[in-house]
C-alpha cells in the first residue's frame, strides 16, 4: 500500500507566518485532514531605508520573515515532514522584494536541520506602503488591465524607486512577492516565476493575454528585466534543491499563490459557495460563472474587484475596510467615555457586555452606516447614525444596529441578487469577528437569502497545501 500523500502549506502573511501539514481524508477524495500546524509572529517591520519615502514607507526585513518560517517548520513533527511530497506557498499580495540571481540566499547544511538565509536581498516593500501619492500615481501610464494600480503595488513601487532612488535597484536583477522569493530560493530558480494571481496584484498585467504590459512599461523606462515569468497557479515551479529540515531534496514546490485566493480555496467546497470573512476588515468572495471576463478598463470607483483564481476563472470580491475594527473602535470609545467619568473598565469586559445586551435586543429601528474608515471605492465616505428615537438608545440597540450596519454596508457593495445571478447557493462564514460575536452571526443569517455555514475559518496555509494535495491526487487518478 502506498504511503499517504502529505503536503506542506506555507503562508507568509503581513504579521505572521503559518505552516500546515495536510493529507487526504481516507475514503473521501475531496476531503483532507490537517495533521499539524504552527504560526509564528514575524515581527519584521523596519524603518524605511529611503528618507524620501518619508513616514509613509512600510518595509519588512526578509531575514526575520525567514526566521519565523523556520521556527514554524521546526515545530512540526519531523516524521511527518519526511513524508512531504509537495509544498504549496502563498503570501501577502502586492508587495515587492528584490534579489540578485544566484546570490539571494545561502544554504547552511552543516546544521542538524538544513535551511537557507537571505543574502543579496532588499527589504520587502509591503502592500501597506504609502509612498506613492495620488499625484504620483496619476503621473503613471494607464495600465492595459481591468485592475487599477495603487500605492503598495509592486509595479507602482518600482516606478517610485526608479524616479526617487534609482541607485537602489542597481544591485538586483530579480524581483517578486515575498512568496515568489521563497519559492525561487527553495528551487534555486534561475529566474523568478509568478502566478497570474500575484502578477495581477502588482498592476500592469493583462489577465486576458496573461502578459505584462511590456510595450507601455518599456516606453516609460521601467526595468522590465525585473518582471518574473508567468505560470498557471496550481502548477509546479520546481523542486527543492536541498534537503530542508526533514523535507527531502527534490520535493515538488508549487508556484506561489496570493493569500486571498489560497484563503478562499481553503473553505470553498463548491463553486456555488460564497466565502464571507469578517475579521479586522471584511471580504465577500464568490467564483464567477464559467467564461466570465472582466471589462479591460480600470474603475477605481467600482465596489467589486475581479481577481484571477484557478483554471483561468475569476473571483468577484467585495472588500470592505469596515469590519471588526469598527466594533473595536466603538468599544474603545465607550472605555474612553467611562474613563472621563472616572470609571475604569477593561475593553474585553465592555465587548462581552455589549454583545450580551445586543443578543437580548432582537431588533432595532436605529440605523448605523459604520464606514468610519471610508472604503477603497469611496475613500471620503464617513459613518452616520439615523432613525434615532428615545426608545432605541440602549447599549443593546446600538450594538445590534452596529453589527447590522457592518453586514448591510457589505451588501451595498455586493448585493445578494448579484450573488444569485452568479449562481451562489450557500455562504461560508468565517473570521475572528464572526466566531466571537453571536449577534453578527444572526445579522449575517438575516441578510443573506441562502443557507449560511459557520465554523470553517479561512486559512491560506491550508489552501496552499490543498491546491498541491489535490493536484497530486488528480495526477494519481489519471
Image (spheres, grey):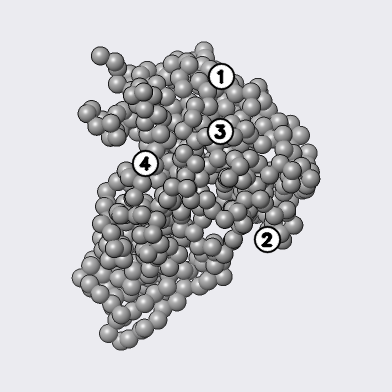
220 up-or-down from 384: above or below: above
Q: Nearer the viewer, mark 1 or mark 4?
A: 4
> Can you tell which quarter of the image residue 96 is in?
top right
Residue 248: quarter of image: top left
Q: Which mark is residue 134?
A: 2
* Mark closest to the chain's N terminus, 1 or 4: 1
Tell me the residue that label 1 is attached to. 107
Which tag is nearer the camera, tag 1 or tag 3?
A: 3
* Residue that badge 3 annotates: 231
Tell me the element at label 4: helix
Residue with the mark numbered 4: 266
Q: Residue at x 57, y 55 (%)?
A: 295
**Disc 1 or 2, which lies upstream in sequence?**
1
The image position of residue 197, as x and y in percent, is 53, 42
- Number of residues whose C-alpha sits closer than 10 Å to that of mark 3, classed few (under 14), some (14–19) or many (20 or more): some
At mark 3, the secondary structure is strand
Q: Nearer the viewer, residue 234 or 424?
A: 424
Residue at image location 22% in from the left, 72% down from the top: 362
C-beta proximity under 8 Å, tags 1 and 3: no
Amino acid at each position: 500500500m502506498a504511503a499517504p500523500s502529505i503536503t506542506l502549506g506555507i503562508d507568509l502573511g503581513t504579521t505572521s507566518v503559518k505552516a500546515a501539514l495536510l493529507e487526504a481524508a481516507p475514503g473521501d477524495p475531496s476531503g483532507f485532514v490537517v495533521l499539524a500546524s504552527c504560526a509564528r509572529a514575524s515581527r519584521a517591520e523596519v524603518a524605511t531605508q529611503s528618507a524620501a519615502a518619508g513616514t509613509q514607507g512600510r518595509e519588512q526585513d526578509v531575514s526575520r520573515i525567514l526566521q519565523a518560517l523556520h521556527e514554524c517548520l521546526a515545530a512540526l513533527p519531523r516524521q511527518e515532514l519526511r513524508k512531504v511530497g509537495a509544498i504549496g506557498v502563498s503570501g501577502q499580495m502586492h508587495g515587492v522584494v528584490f534579489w540578485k540571481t544566484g546570490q539571494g540566499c545561502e544554504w547552511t547544511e552543516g546544521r542538524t536541520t538544513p535551511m537557507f538565509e537571505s543574502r543579496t536581498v532588499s527589504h520587502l516593500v509591503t502592500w501597506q506602503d504609502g509612498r506613492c501619492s495620488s499625484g504620483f500615481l496619476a503621473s503613471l501610464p494607464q495600465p492595459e488591465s481591468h485592475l487599477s494600480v495603487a500605492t503598495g503595488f509592486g509595479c507602482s513601487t518600482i516606478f517610485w524607486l526608479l524616479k526617487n532612488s534609482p541607485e537602489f535597484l542597481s544591485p538586483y536583477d530579480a524581483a517578486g512577492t515575498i512568496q515568489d522569493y521563497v519559492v525561487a530560493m527553495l528551487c534555486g530558480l534561475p529566474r523568478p516565476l509568478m502566478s497570474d494571481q500575484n502578477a495581477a496584484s502588482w498592476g500592469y498585467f493583462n489577465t486576458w493575454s496573461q502578459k505584462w504590459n511590456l510595450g507601455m512599461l518599456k516606453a516609460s523606462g521601467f526595468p522590465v528585466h525585473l518582471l518574473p515569468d508567468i505560470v498557471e497557479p496550481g502548477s509546479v515551479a520546481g523542486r527543492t534543491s536541498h534537503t530542508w529540515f526533514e523535507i527531502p531534496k527534490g520535493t515538488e514546490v508549487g508556484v506561489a499563490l496570493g493569500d486571498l485566493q489560497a484563503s478562499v480555496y481553503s473553505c470553498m467546497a463548491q463553486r456555488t459557495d460564497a466565502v464571507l470573512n469578517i475579521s479586522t476588515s471584511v471580504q465577500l468572495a464568490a467564483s464567477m460563472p464559467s467564461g466570465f471576463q472582466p471589462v479591460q478598463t480600470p474603475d477605481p470607483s467600482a465596489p467589486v474587484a475581479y481577481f484571477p483564481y484557478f483554471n483561468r476563472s475569476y473571483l468577484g470580491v467585495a472588500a470592505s475596510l469596515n469590519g471588526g475594527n469598527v466594533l473595536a473602535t466603538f468599544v474603545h470609545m465607550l472605555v474612553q467615555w467611562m474613563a472621563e467619568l472616572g470609571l475604569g473598565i477593561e475593553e474585553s469586559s465592555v465587548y462581552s457586555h455589549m454583545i450580551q445586551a445586543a443578543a437580548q435586543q432582537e431588533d432595532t429601528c436605529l440605523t448605523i452606516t459604520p464606514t468610519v474608515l471610508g472604503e477603497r471605492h469611496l475613500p471620503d465616505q464617513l459613518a452616520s447614525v439615523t432613525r434615532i428615537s428615545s426608545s432605541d438608545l440602549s447599549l443593546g440597540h446600538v450594538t445590534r444596529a452596529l453589527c447590522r450596519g457592518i453586514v448591510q454596508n457589505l451588501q451595498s457593495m455586493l448585493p445578494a441578487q448579484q450573488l444569485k445571478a452568479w449562481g451562489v447557493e450557500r455562504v461560508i462564514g468565517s473570521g475572528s469577528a464572526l466566531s466571537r460575536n453571536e449577534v453578527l452571526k444572526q445579522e449575517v443569517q438575516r441578510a443573506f437569502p441562502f443557507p449560511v455555514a459557520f465554523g470553517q475559518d479561512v486559512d491560506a496555509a491550508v489552501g496552499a497545501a490543498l491546491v498541491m494535495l489535490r493536484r497530486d491526487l488528480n495526477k494519481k487518478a489519471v
